[in-house]
Image: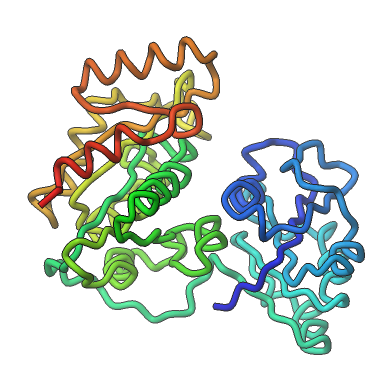
Amino acid sequence: MKLTPPYALFLGDATDTLGLKMANSIATWRKHQCIGEISLPECTVTTGLPQLSVNKAAELGAKTFVLGFNNAGGHIDAKYIPEIKIAIQQGLNIVNGLHDKLTDIPELVTLANQHNVDLIDIRHPTTRFKTANGEKRTGKRLLTVGTDCSVGKMYTTLAIHTALQARQINSTFRATGQCGILIAGEGVAVDCVVADFISGAVEALTPNNDDAHWDIIEGQGSLFQPAYAGVTLGLIHGAQPDALVLCHILQRDKMRGMPSYALPDIHDAIELNLRHARLTNPGCQIVGISINTSAVDDITAKETCLQIAKQTGLPCQDPIRHGVTQIVDQLVTLYSD
C-alpha cells in the first residue's frame, strides 16, 4: 500500500454527514495533507475544506483523489466515473474505501495504466492471513468497543493515541477500517477479511512489541449489532486487549439501520465486552467510557458524563467536547508498572 498526499477529497452526491465519514476523518486528523474537496451538484454536505474542481486540485499539487463518501452498500455509481476519469487523466492516484473495487472496472484500469497511476482499494486486503493462535504477545494493547456502530470508536482511538504521544508514551495507532487506514497510511480493513482469519489478521496487525509500548486499536461494530457482531468478536479476540474503552452515543434509541433492536445498557455492554475480551486476555480491564454527546447541549453533555461516571466508577468524557485526559489518566494509573 502506498498512499501519497496531498489529497483531494471527492464527496460525490452525499447528503448526510454520516455519509462523509471517510472525508471527514482525513479532514479532521490530517487536514494539513488535504488540498480541498470536490463534489457533484447533488451534494449538500461539506468537510469545510475549499471547494475545487479536479483540475484545480491537481494544479495546486494534489497527488491522490480520495473517494471520501460511504453510500448504502458501498457502491461506485456510474455518476462518479467521469470525475474519477478526470482525476486519473490529471495523474492522480485514486483511493477507494467502498465495498466495490476500482480494479473491477476495466475502463478505469485501462486508463490508470495509460497514465501510470495507482487504483488503491484500501478496504480489500491483499495480504494472506493465518488463523489466530491466541498466544500471548508482548507489549500492551487498548481497544475501543461500542454499544453500536458509528458511535465514535475511531475518533476516540485517535484522541487517546494523540494524548499518549503528547505525554511521550510510546504508542501506535492501529487502523482496522478504511477511514483509519487512510489516516494511518496502513492497516487492515477487518470487515473484508474472511471470518476465520479476522482474529489472525488482528494478531498480525498488533505483533510483539516492547513491554511499555501501547497499540491503540480502532474498534469496529458492536457485540450487540446483529449485522456486525461477528467482526467485533474476531477483533476483540485477536487484539488480546489489556484495556477497553467503551464508546456510546446519546439519544440514539435504536441500532443504526436496525429499528427492531435497542441499544444496550452501558453496564450490560461493559460486562459482555469484558467477558469476551478475557478469553484471550484474562487481565483485561475497562478504563473509561467515551460518549458522543453531539445531540445535546454543553450543560446536558457535562451532566450526563458526570452521572455515568458516578454510576460506573469510570471516567466518562466526550473526546470532542472534553478531551480524553481523564481516560488516559486512568490508563496510565492502572498500567504504570
> Who's the residue at 28% across and 64% down the image?
199
Is 190 in front, or is 327?
Answer: 327
Q: In the drawing, does residue 140 fall left or right of residue 154?
A: left
Q: Residue 14 in the image: x percent, y percent?
A: 75, 43
On-image quarter of the N terminus: bottom right
The quarter holding residue 235 reads bottom left
Is 168 in front, or is 333?
Answer: 168
Is 253 in front, or is 210?
Answer: 210
Q: In the drawing, does residue 190 fall left or right of residue 271?
A: right
The quarter holding residue 188 reads bottom left
> Who's the residue at 38% across and 36% down the image?
324
Count of number-bearing discs: 0
Q: Residue 60 in the image: x percent, y percent?
A: 85, 65
Q: Residue 255, relative to residue 124: is it above or below?
A: above
The quarter holding residue 261 reads top left
Q: Residue 75 in the image: x percent, y percent?
A: 68, 57
> Who's the residue at 77% across and 88% down the image?
116
Q: Residue 232 in the image: x percent, y percent?
A: 33, 50
> Who's the residue at 70% across and 59% down the image?
67
